Amino acid sequence: MRFSIILLAAFISFQAWGQTRLTEAQQKQIVEKIDRSAQRMTTMQCTFTQTKSMKMLSKKMISKGVMYFKRPSQLRWQYTSPYDYTFLLNGDKIRLKSAKSTKDISVQGNKMFRQITNIILNSITGGSLRSTSDFRLEMYKTGNTYFARLYPKKKELKQVYQIIEIYFSPALDCVSSVKMIEKSGDTTLVELNGIKYNASINEKMFSLR
C-alpha cells in the first residue's frame, strides 16, 4: 500500500510566486481546453524523476524510471534507479513486481486501491479536474504555467492527503508534473520528461503473465 501511495505523487514543485487564482469562468475555460487535449490522447510514454521529502529525514529520496500508459486503463510505472520495481495496471488487475517478489491485487476487491488507481490515471489524463465528487478544485496561474490544486473530499483520501497539485505545460496539452502533500507533511513530487503522445506501445508492456 505504501508503494501505491508513493506512486500517486504523481509529479512538481514549482514555487508559486505571483500565483493568481482563476475566476470561475476562467477556470471552466481552462479545464475544457485541458479536457479536449486529453481526449485526443490514446497513449503516453515518458521518463520520470520522483523526489520524496520526509519531515523526519533531511535527505531527499530521489528515484527515476519510465512510464507507459494506454487508454482506458493500462499503465506501466517502472522504477529503474536506484532500484528496479514495477507497478502494472491492466483493467482491474494490478501487479507489483520487484527482483525478489511478485504480488497480484484485484482493484475491485480493494476500495483504497481502486481510489488510488483512479487518481493515478486521472492525474495522467487530467481527469481529476472533472472529479467533483472526489475533490474540490481551484485553478491557478503562475507565470505562463497553469496548475490545479485539488482538495480531497472523501474520508479515505483525506486521511492520507492534504492537497494534490497537478501542473500543465504552457500549451495545456499535457500534464508536466504532480505534487502530493500528505497529512503528515511529507511530500512526493514526480516530474515527467520526454513525453510522447499517441505513439505505438507493445502490449507486452502491460502483460500480467
Image (cartoon, rainbow, N blue to C red):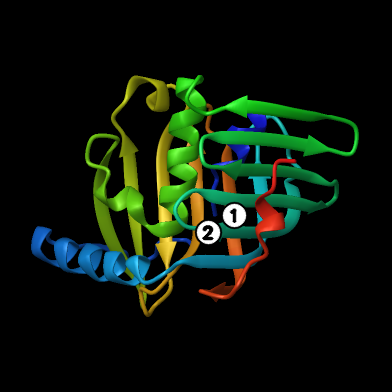
Residue 97 location in percent, x, y?
78, 37
Give the residue displayed 69% in from the left and 28% down from the top.
104
Element on which disc 1 rests = strand
Give the residue displayed 37% in from the left and 57% down from the top.
126
Instruction: Please indicate, yes or no, whether residue 5 appears anywhere in the rendered image.
Output: yes
Instruction: Please indicate, yes or no, whether residue 18 appears anywhere in the rendered image.
Output: no
Residue 91 location in percent, x, y?
52, 41
Q: Residue furthest right?
A: 100
Tell me the mark number nearer the camera, choosing from 1 and 2.
2
Residue 27 location in percent, x, y?
18, 62
Residue 112 location in percent, x, y?
48, 24
**Residue 16 position (above or below residue 183):** below
In this view, the residue in front, 127 or 62, is 127
**Residue 184 position (above or below residue 147):** above
Residue wearing tag 2? 70
Residue wearing tag 1? 190
Element on which disc 2 rests = strand
Earlier residue among tags 1 and 2: 2
Give the residue displayed 29% in from the left and 52% down from the top.
129
Which amino acid type corresponds to the residue marked 1 in the rendered image?
Answer: Val
**Residue 38 position (above or below residue 110):** below
